[in-house]
């Protein structure tokens, strides 16, 4: 594919300015014009990509320079954008906010530079008039390598307010590409870890995305935004699209025979387990697995022939009663894990494997209890595998992300999953037989050998 796919990055001075509304609405508005839109999200967030998928009909993908490394941002972007007419990338936090203590790393500005993409700044104008010019000028001039190509004014109160804002911004030299009034129907409900995922409010989410699209189409200059996106040149560095297939792997007759015996890898989904990067399933398939999704809230059995199990993140605490009530599936998970089959669990998956969650029985694979907590644990982590497991050999270094309001006691087993490096080094997670369970969310594209190792263990366990 061409490395010059038209693209925009939607950023803001701070969280809460309206990035998700504008980015999702713009994706849907472009799609309504007949464009094939590639949706992307900066950072580790799993929830916004669900709304992006509704807006575009394509899977939402993350671009995280911390988890995957800066060198993979361009290739992962091009992989997701294959066959598309335009790409919209929603930023994270404020434009220049990145991994704590790491400078610009993983910030929206950093990703925009890695992509060579123009930035559209979404500004909450609800409590300012002439000051908006100083704000926009500061963000546009802070880093000369970041091209702020326009501004969209959000939460504008009236025609007179708009007039004052436009007059002020003429001095800043940044064009106004849209003006949005307050609109209650585009808001999406939140709770302890952010927006409520699409899977939990499908009908309402569809209506919200439609409202976002209408608001953006009515208040923004879609032609000017598309022209700005088309002005982006080639992605810097001569990037080629990322591929889940190993570049050094050449199929043999024995590989082809193994392909016919593809092990079934069950992946938990449904409303309780919505956190998953699309590349994980793609890597598993490329490694020779047959990936079969299932819903722990409704399915009483694992997929037929399941030889391995992947349980990602989500909100099991919201569905703890239903998960606990599904005793047949809990027993099936425990039996599979007890057989030594490979099981990879992250965050919510870790809680599901525990003995109990908030006092209600879970799968009992791990001799640990889990409960909700008032304390938010949040941040990037630099981790190293303590010992050999179904995911990684001892010493494998990976970067991860923690994001939860739960506590597991004990926090690690006799064989921990990871040693977390940094100012307060610690061990966390559990490795026992074929089980690898941890709070860390990781992105397997950064270490493709993880998926190949897991599938090979599925074949041989």
Image (cartoon, rainbow, N blue to C red):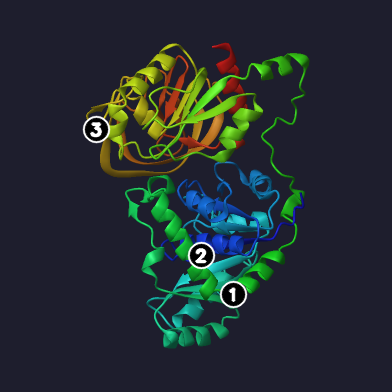
Q: Give residue 240's position: percent from left, percent from top.
A: 74, 45
Classify mark 3: helix, strand or loop.
loop
| Residue 358, label in figure | 3
- The residue at the point 56 percent across, 28 percent down is 291
Residue pointed to by mark 2: 213
Q: Position of residue 294 (x, y in %)?
A: 46, 30
In the rendered image of this protein, does residue 366 appear above or below residue 191? above
What residue is shown with label 1?
221
Q: Which residue is located at x 36 percent, y 19 percent?
A: 365
* Label 2–label 1 contact, CB within 8 A: no
Residue 14: x and y, percent? 44, 63
Label 2 crowd bin: few (<14), some (14–19), many (20+), radius 10 Å: many
Name above or below for residue 111 compared with residue 199. below
Q: Residue furthest left?
A: 359
N-terminal-most mark, 3 or 1: 1
Task: Please indicate, yes or no, whether residue 444 appears anywhere in the rendered image.
Answer: no
- The residues bearing labels 3 and 2 have C-alpha atoms spaced at a distance of 40 Å
For marks 2 and 1, the one nearer the N-term is 2
Q: Earlier in the sequence, mark 3 or mark 2?
A: 2
Q: Residue furthest front?
A: 203
SS of the residue at dot 2? Answer: helix
Mark 3 near mark 1, Cβ–Cβ under 8 Å? Answer: no
* C-alpha span from label 3 to label 1: 50 Å
Marks 2 and 1, how far apart at CA: 13 Å
The reply, left or right, for residue 65 in relation to residue 411 is right
Q: Quadrant of residue 419?
A: top left
């Amino acid at each position: 594919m061409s490395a010059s796919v038209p693209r925009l990055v939607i950023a803001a001075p701070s969280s809460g300015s309206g990035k998700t509304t504008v980015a999702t609405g713009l994706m849907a508005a472009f799609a309504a014009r007949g464009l094939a839109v590639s949706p992307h999200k900066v950072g580790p967030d799993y929830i916004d990509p669900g709304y992006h998928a509704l807006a575009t009909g394509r899977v939402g993908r993350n671009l995280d320079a911390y988890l995957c490394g800066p060198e993979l941002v361009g290739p992962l972007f091009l992989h997701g954008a294959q066959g598309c007419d335009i790409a919209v990338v929603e930023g994270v936090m404020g434009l220049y906010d990145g991994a704590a203590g790491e400078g610009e790393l993983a910030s929206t500005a950093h990703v925009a530079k890695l992509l060579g993409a123009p930035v559209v700044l979404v500004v909450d104008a609800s409590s300012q008039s002439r000051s908006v010019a100083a704000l926009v000028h500061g963000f546009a001039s802070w880093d000369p390598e970041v091209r702020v190509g326009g501004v969209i004014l959000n939460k504008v109160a009236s025609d007179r307010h708009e007039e004052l804002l436009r007059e002020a911004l003429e001095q800043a030299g940044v064009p106004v590409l849209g003006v949005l009034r307050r609109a209650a129907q585009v808001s999406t409900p939140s709770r302890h870890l952010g927006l409520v995922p699409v899977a939990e409010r499908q009908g309402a989410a569809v209506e919200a995305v439609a409202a976002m699209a209408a608001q953006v189409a009515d208040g923004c200059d879609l032609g000017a935004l598309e022209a700005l996106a088309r002005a982006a040149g080639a992605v810097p560095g001569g990037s080629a699209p990322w591929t889940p297939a190993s570049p050094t792997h050449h199929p043999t007759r024995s590989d082809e025979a193994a392909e016919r015996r593809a092990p079934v890898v069950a992946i938990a989904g449904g409303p309780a387990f919505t956190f998953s990067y699309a590349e994980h399933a793609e890597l598993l398939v490329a490694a020779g697995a047959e990936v079969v999704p299932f819903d722990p809230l409704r399915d009483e059995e694992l997929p037929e022939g399941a030889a391995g199990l992947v349980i990602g993140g989500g909100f099991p605490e919201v569905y703890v009663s239903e998960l606990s009530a599904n005793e047949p599936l809990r027993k099936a998970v425990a039996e599979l894990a007890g057989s030594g089959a490979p099981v990879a669990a992250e965050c919510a998956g870790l809680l599901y494997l525990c003995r109990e969650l908030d006092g209600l029985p879970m799968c009992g694979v791990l001799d640990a209890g889990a409960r909700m907590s008032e304390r938010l644990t949040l941040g990037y982590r630099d981790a190293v595998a303590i010992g050999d497991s179904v995911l990684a050999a001892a010493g494998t270094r990976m970067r991860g992300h923690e994001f939860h309001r739960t506590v597991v006691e004990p926090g690690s087993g006799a064989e921990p999953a990871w040693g977390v490096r940094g100012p307060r080094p610690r061990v966390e997670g559990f490795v026992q037989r074929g089980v690898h369970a941890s709070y860390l969310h990781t992105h397997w594209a950064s270490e493709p050998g993880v998926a190949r190792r897991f599938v090979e263990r599925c074949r041989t366990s």
